[in-house]
Image (cartoon, rainbow, N blue to C red):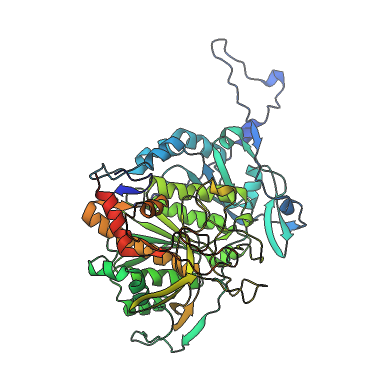
Amino acid sequence: MCIKTGALHTYRHRMAESVFGLLILSLLFAACSGSTATPSQQPTQSTNQPAQVTPVLQFTTYDLKLPSAATNSPVVGPLPLDTVLQVGITFKINQAEVDKLGLHNTDKGGQNTDLQTIANQIGISDQTYQSIKNFFGVTDAKLQLNKLHTYLSVSAKAQTFASLFQTTFVIHRLNGRTFYMPATPPKLPTVIANNIVAITGLDSYSPPPDFKFGGQRLLTETAQQQVSTANCQVSKGAAPSDIASAYGYDQLWKRGWNGKGITVNLVELGGVYGSDIQNYMSCVKFQGKIGTVTVGKAPTTASVEATLDIEMVAGLAPGSNIVVYQTDINAAKTLADAWTLINNELQQIINDNTKNSGGNIVSFGLGSAEAFLSNDEIKALDQSFEILEKTEHLTVFVDSGDCAAFADGTYNSLSVSYPASDPYVVSVGGTILGADSSGRSVELAWSDGSNRKSCNNGWGTGGGVKNQYSRSMRQVPDVSGIALGLQLYYSGKWYTINGTSGTTPIWAAGMALVNEGLIQQAGVYGYGPSLFYVIANNSNGKHPYYDITDGDNLYYKAAKGWDYPTGLGTPNMVDFYNVLYALATQH
């Protein structure tokens, strides 16, 4: 039987490599100015030599499409000229080539492909990039083209970008926050503008992700200080063993699958306390590997989000390879464009997987209401997710948010979170689960409407109708899992914590177990959001998801089948695997 687009792909062993380039070039716009020499001063032209004509650059005004509320908001001063900006330039892709790479059925023994060798067919050509370097190269700029030729990261001072794009930068104030943007629309050489999908980082209008964790406050379980032996004494909350028993992860463990050989990539805006991670790893008997990749500035503070992500994966896929992509959360909270920093992390994941996806996964626990992000921010991120899914065959899990059906934080304002609403990711909602070591008992959609004036304490699982970004595809979420009362070890103490940010790595860990098993038994692995609907529609009497029919997200009610609060449901990982295996081995 044929599997739908993007569902299965042959396991290919690829080794990651990184190429870093620093291009220091000279600005060539001076060539556009006319000569001031008099006719008598002009050099004599040979009758046998054609006159050399310097081409005149044609410029195109680039519309950042910022909302009128932003452009009309008060200007409070100029952006200092020496401010270093991180700008991302997203280039047009060869859509037919990318779509072809995403068209795979069950495939055993396929040819190993290094995507970098076909970068000229996926993104811009070497020749086009050379012309772009000639135009964009400036003495103080650092440029890095990604391996697939689809994204250029440029770091330079505001003064440089102002000269380059024929504008100036000013600081605006709107709704209590400040951001910078060009005073006049930037101008680009037309030959370059024609190759661009989006430019980010020339403004910081889009606010950073909400760093409140479902708004919930950490609830202290034990206040013991860190000691030389592992502190594993905690009585409240759902332990990894409880979650594993409730969702069948432990049954896959019994088959010997613990995520070995699978990499789970975490996208983070902050670091962790090493002693916390060491303590937790000891408690769950983690046997895999963990590493970090710093993109931009190294984190200066520890993040609850990053800590929870690592711990959830480590507890449920204890043999996996965890790679933490991190950048500085403090930079993201300042005038810097946080989403460009995040996209730079995604680009590094793209670079690191041009040779080896092998069933690898991305867990992404960040988001904002769709309306909060600028048009170019959405387009740039969307293309990154499309490349991760279609060309590199990674499954990207994204949390649906913790403000119930009102992602913008205004009660009764129906909205969903981005990038949970992106069509190339698997959106993960949250439930309240009654579970212990004996298994799953009761489960319902997570919501809490006790304080409708503020989402700071978490209103519940995000879910609802996408805006224009849905492209008539799925709505939010795709799947769900436990979000209330997760155990966390942070800053030397045990806590319980709520949020779909914790549910997302739970699903990522489950997918790691499944792909390990598929690779061993069928030589294939699963990837992409369509996979989850293929499984639901071909269950043949099995139950790959626990259908959640109780509860709501303060607007939409859970119901039989797919619903807005919980999607297809929560994982029944044994049946999920068995259905997928049957599909993968059918001829």
- Residue 451: percent from left, percent from top: 64, 76
**Residue at x-position 72% and y-position 22%:** 38
Q: Is residue 321 visible?
A: no
Residue 434 appears in which quarter of the rendering? bottom left
Q: Is residue 41 left or right of residue 467?
A: right
- Residue 323: percent from left, percent from top: 38, 63
**Residue at x-position 59% and y-position 52%:** 201
Outermost residue to the top: 47
Towards the viewer: 339 or 375 = 375
Q: Is residue 466 left or right of residue 394?
A: right
**Residue at x-position 76% and y-position 55%:** 73
Towards the viewer: 11 or 352 = 11
Q: Is residue 504 visible?
A: yes
- Residue 87: percent from left, percent from top: 57, 50
- Residue 339: percent from left, percent from top: 56, 56
Is the C terminus in the top left, top right, bottom left or bottom right quadrant?
top left
**Residue at x-position 57% and y-position 71%:** 212
Residue 34 higher or lower than 43, as above or below: below
Towards the viewer: 532 or 237 = 532
Q: Is residue 540 left or right of residue 140?
A: left
Residue 138 higher or lower than 397, as above or below: above
Is the N terminus in the top left, top right, bottom left or bottom right quadrant?
top left
Count the marks.
0
